Amino acid sequence: MEFRLLILSLIGSVLSVLAAGLFLFFPKRTRDNLVPCLISYATGTLLGAAFLGLLPKALNMGAAPVAVLGAALAGIFAFLGLEKTLLWRHCHHENCEVHSSAGIMIVIGDALHNFMDGVLIGSALLVSPGLALTSTLAVVAHEIPQETGDFAIMLAAGWSRKKALWANIASSLATLPGAFGAYYALAYFKPALPYVMAVSAASFIYIALADLIPAAHRHPGQGKPVLQFLLGLAGVGTIAFLC
């Protein structure tokens, strides 16, 4: 089981960074057309994983539904607070008003975000391998456009491709302590598992509603709206098929 956790964690972290790095070799016009589509698909996978996978599992673990949903609500406000401290912000374009040229802030924020992704993967694997797989897919789906934006901002700030790549790989490795720490800690304290799952679902909901959907609305002329809508549904469908 530990080996499976390691593989899923690496897929959700390092593989996402490498995929985003390859994406930057595409012409800028191609990136501008593809990123809105990736964001739409990621939105669907995040919402699907939260509402079809994580929350139903959390509510079926014997804890009081009000307490579980309260934990999810508290999680949403906690992530709002993190975003206001500039440590939890996702960039999908070079003109990021929050990060600007502060590349080091991106690395710190990504490390925190990746640690939380690891907690999600580790806690999901304690419930079932299928839930861990769908959660990892949702992580990858939203990490690729995020990392693509981070690379673009770092390069615009004067970072070399090599420095930007290694910085993002280093921050992505924070997924591993998050995953293994949650897996071993929650194995000994399983009453906390439904609440951790609820907060994990809250992180997916918050990213989708507070970041990804507004990112799609900021550039209504980019991409094809009908295609993006269908890709969002495809993201939900993918999670529904795997659940």
Image: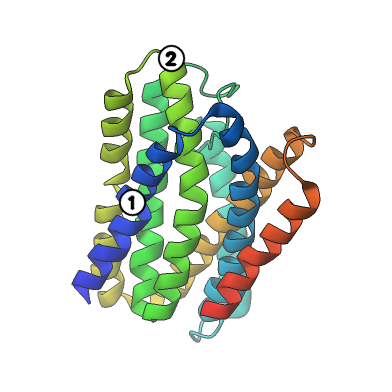
Residues at marks 1 and 2, CA–CA distance in whole angstroms: 24 Å
Q: Secondary structure at mark 1?
A: helix
**Measured from the top left, where is residue 30 in percent x and y?**
58, 35
Residue drawn at (39%, 81%) of the image: 128
Amino acid of disc 1: Leu
Q: Quadrant of the N terminus?
A: bottom left
Among numbered discs 1 and 2, the one appearing first in the sequence: 1
From the viewer's perspective, is residue 40 above or below residue 190? Answer: above
* Up/down of 229 relative to 243, above or below: above
Total marks drawn? 2
Q: Residue at x 19, y 70 (%)?
A: 3
Q: Alpha-carbon neighbours of circle 1 within 10 Å: few (<14), some, or many (≥20)?
A: some
Give the label on residue 129, or none.
Answer: none
Q: Which mark is residue 157?
A: 2
The image position of residue 170, as x and y in percent, is: 26, 38
Task: State whether residue 43 is above or below residue 187.
Answer: above
Q: Amino acid at mark 2?
A: Ala
Q: Position of residue 148 (x, y in %)?
A: 47, 36
Mark 1 = which residue?
Answer: 15
Residue 230, quarter of the rendered image: bottom right
Seen from the viewer's position, the closer of residues 40 and 31 is: 31
Depth check: give the residue in front, 105 or 139.
139
